[in-house]
Image (cartoon, rainbow, N blue to C red):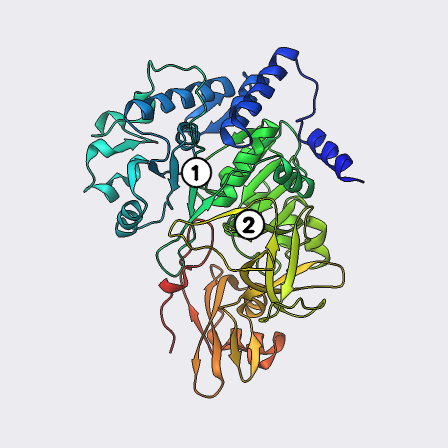
Amino acid sequence: MGDLGYKVKVLRQIGLIKAAPPGRLFGAVKQLKKWGPGLPAGINAAARRYPNQIAIIDDEGEITYSELIAQINQFTEVLRERGLQPGDSIALLARNHRYFVIALVAIIQLGARILLLNTMASKAQLTDLAEREGAELLILDEEFLPLVDEVRRSRLIAAWADNPEALEVPTIANLIVGKPKGDQEVPERKGEIVIFTSGTTGLPKGAKRREPDDLLPLITYYGAIPVEGNSTMIVAAPLFHSWGLLNYGFAQTTVPTVILRRRFDPEQTLADIEKYKAEVLVVVPLMIQRMANLPEADAEKYNVSSLKITASSGSALAGDMPIRFMDRYTDSIYNFYGATETSWVSIASPQDLRDAPGTAGRVPWRTEVKILDSEGNELPTGEIGVIHVINDMPFGGYTDGRSKAVHGGLIDTGDLGYFDEQGRLFVSGRDDDMIISGGENVFPRELEDCLSDHPDVSDVVVTGIADAEWGQRLVAYVVLEEGSYATEASLIAYAKENVPRFAVPKAIAMLDELPRNPTGKVMKRMLPPIE
């Protein structure tokens, strides 16, 4: 199939090429032309095509597309009346709900710069980031107000509020009352989104994401993950992270009904799938783990046969986790490998994950991936090197002026990996995670996958420490299944039977839980030391 045929096929699949009343279709096309690709265009066009369709279901209830765009326009007016202008920085600290979306799109419509803050950030971290990025205004959920008690109340707006009457700051819901609902003018400069990297080892870096210039990234993504138009979608992954945001933003062209919950609960998610016949679930791997580990009696209470796509990204899918999830629920996992800076690198289908557990999948359309050695030379199939990529989602650089290393026009991901004979990509680990033990290159991933498959292990992360005899050795931090009595010795013996000698851990520490951020990545700086 040629490029044109491929484009038409995908656009039909997502419903962008579809018969509609001429007036509505003209209105949608007008909004797309006015705003160009991006969130304002997507939601404005969706509101013209299907004004009465439910746009969001959240903990407050339901809101249609016409109601949603009206409130977005009203909040844009609120920001403008407060003196905010294109180019100003506005921070947003919120969980998944309608007010996150209202604030996000209003800020972009204004032409301002939105700083998406991590809901697990500390008070000191929030203060440092807000000062470093020059935030003029902070919009945050009520629960986070204690973290900004030293900030002037005039610089604060509450997004989600359980007790709005008791707050000292105004809420989005109150501020928009009586404001004009009409279309907004395109600002003199495009709005900008700044997403902060995970910060598992220190203060997060601000990564600027440019909205795409055309529909090519959308076609690439939905060509690999076959979402259909007007699907009901649960976005459980946090919207402040690039994975949740990408899925919500791209989905607007398909005019979905999106279910947003402030906190992830595996049973609530299953109940939502059953109640709303959800076809798409957007998660991070930790959520897949929690759903796969639900007691069988709890999981079997729900009919989730409608689920066609479980889109996952954010960290590695360890061991047989995807197989256990698909055996229990539906063959639906599409695992996206990429990063905030690179967007996608490869995407694994359910069949890829069954045929080659641990694969990061295949390189999608209009994406180039090469495995390079330290000299920048391309390596042959099967040899491990640094993964480099280029696609249609350009990285805008870090807010401090730095960018990722580039070789031959391809971005250095910082990950090590290789291709197999079938063209599937495998990620061995981070370049800086690799250790040399007894003269051998050792990656934590192999031991993590091994221990994850042990029936008594609920969660695990592996890292390296200095060792007088071997130079470096691996150590593992393990969370046991409830009621399990596995010991350090028994788990080391299990590892000896399943991994090479140089990958056997020197020690294993038992923890109640691993310190993870909202996207599921382990914050290794918070792990206790092992001698």
Q: Position of residue 412 (x, y in %)?
A: 55, 60
Q: Residue at x 33, y 26 (%)?
A: 79
Q: Nearer the viewer, residue 57 or 26?
A: 26
Callout 2 secondary element: loop
Give the quadrant of the N terminus. top right
**Residue 10 sits in which quadrant?**
top right
Q: In front: 8, or 499?
A: 8
Label 1, residues with CA under 10 Å away: few <14, some 14-19, many ≥20 = many
Q: Position of residue 220 (x, y in %)?
A: 66, 42
Q: Amino acid at mark 2?
A: Ser
Q: As displayed, is residue 77 above or below residue 351?
A: above
Q: CA distance from mark 2 to mark 1?
A: 23 Å
In this view, 30 is above or below 300: above
Q: Which residue is mark 1?
A: 192
Q: Determine if residue 280 is in view.
A: yes
The residue at the point 67 percent across, 70 percent down is 383
Q: Position of residue 41 (x, y in %)?
A: 53, 26
Q: Is residue 259 left or right of residue 113?
A: right
Q: Secondary structure at mark 1?
A: strand
Q: Earlier in the sequence, mark 2 or mark 1?
A: 1
Q: Which residue is mark 2?
A: 313
Across and down, in percent, residue 394 comes to 54, 46
